[in-house]
Amino acid sequence: MRRAAIFVALVVLAWTAWDTGADPVRLGRGIPWIADFVRRMLPPDLRVLPAALLGAIKTVEIALLGTAVAAVLALPLGFLSARNVAAPAIFHPARVALNFFRSVDTLVYALVFVAAVGLGPFPGVLAVVAYTTTSLAKLYSEAIEGIDRGPVDAITATGATRLQVLRFGVLPQVLPLFLSYVLYRLETNIRAATVLGFVGAGGIGFYLQTYLRMIDYPAASTVLLVTVAMVMVVDAISSRLRARLV
Amino acid sequence: MIEVAGLRVVLPPAVVAVDGIELTIASGEFVVILGRSGAGKTTFLRALNRLVEPTAGTVRVGGRAVTGADPATLRGLRRQIGMVFQQFNLVRRASVLDNVLAGRLGWARPLPTLLGRFGAEDRRIAHECLAQVGLADFAARRADTLSGGEQQRVAIARALAQAPSVILADEPTASLDPALTGSIMDLLKTINVRRGLTLIVSQHQLETALTYATRVIGFRRGRVVFDGAPSALTPQVAATIYGEHR
């Protein structure tokens, strides 16, 4: 059984390698070209630094606003898709809906929203909201399913209403986890938002794509460096905040 | 007064935890329910306020039916029935005062409580109940910074804040250092005597039952095998409750 599984896995991997044209020799031949690319990017053209910084700020704004709106929208969805809170008639469709909308990436949502509301950062925000709401709702619901039953019983026994039980028995247990998930999502959304500009949804990605198209590699490298710095700064702040939550 | 008739609780998949119990408990009694673990003590107590749904039979508290009550009536009845748990069941991350205030949920106006707001009267009662369990200075502390014995006192204060007529205590000393058993039982006894509350306390320790109870009810396999004054609890009776191996 196990040997058969390993054999099947190897066959599948071999086939994918053949079908995608994966070829180490070809990669080897490409290395000088990568080196050439890097050489042409240096030194970075710092004259575009102000533009790159403005783009970076816009990207952070897209991620921040999108994540914040999603964090709130995901709250009711999270409770509705938690097995131990919602009735099965609500929980099952909610789970299916979450998995459906979560299977589409932020970038794909951006394409849809650019078509709907036009170019600029706003469709980027909408795309971040669309993806993050469902992915956070899923994380929320798992946190809710993992709570300690005891305080819920205790609050129920006081004669509290269902909403009060959620507010006093469930919410205090899950809130730190929720905040930690939101910060984690913010980190991944910053990264996702850097490429939103490729499809016209605003932010630093727009500059990167523009300079690459204009074959202005020194300018593109400045944008890339700003992107790396931006992601690292946000990650550092966010992970420090997360460490204080638990 | 608490009247229990034909109470039967079958827990999934098919465990008969409580098997036909008939009892009347008068106001102001200090009843200790004695039995080995698994004798049905916990399930019986939880069926009294319907934290566990009875399979058959009726429970009446102060003349009003708990079994079959609609949600609003049930909440009103639960408000009269304070409950103390073996694991304290405090909201660990919340402050001591917030935990005690939860006891006011059945009385306070629901909407403000959802925002965490309680009226001046509710806060006064909460402080008073904390003082009564000897923890007046602990109001602002986080619940999980307290020792086990202190946490159980907070839980008792939460039950008192309900201004109940009955307190159900499910093995309130079982997760505590044996040295603390006396202080918690003394506190419950004080509440029983001073406030005239009915107490129904489950215990597996015979000596504790004999010291504090005005009436002992022996449970075995979901049935009452003894019901009488502590003085009537002979070694033979104890053997019936606890079975062959003590």
Image (tube, rainbow, N blue to C red):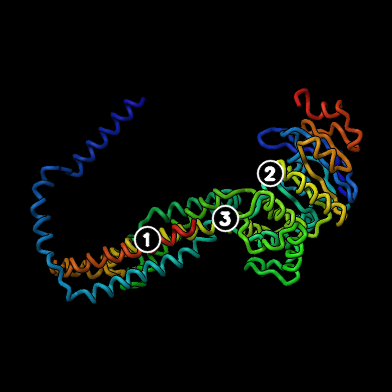
Q: Nearer the viewer, mark 1 or mark 2?
A: 2
Of all residues shown, which one is farthest toward the front?
B179
Could you give the CA–CA distance between mark 1 and mark 2, rounded to whole angstroms? 44 Å
Asked if marks 3 and 2 fall on the same chain, the answer is no
* Residue pointed to by mark 2: B176
Q: Residues within 10 Å of mark 3 (few under 14, many from 20)?
A: many
B54 vs B27: above or below: above
Q: Amino acid at mark 3?
A: Gln
The chain holding disc 3 is: A
* Residue pointed to by mark 3: A173
Residue B213 image position (x, y, % from top left): 86, 42
Q: Residues within 10 Å of mark 2 (few under 14, many from 20)?
A: some
* Residue pointed to by mark 1: A187
Q: Give the structural element (helix, strand or loop) at label 1.
A: helix
Q: Residues within 10 Å of mark 1 (few under 14, many from 20)?
A: many
**Marker disc for residue A57:** none
Q: Give the structural element (helix, strand or loop) at label 3.
A: helix
**Tag 1 and tag 2, C-beta contact below 8 Å:** no
Q: Amino acid at mark 2?
A: Leu
Which quadrant of the structure image shows residue A1?
top left
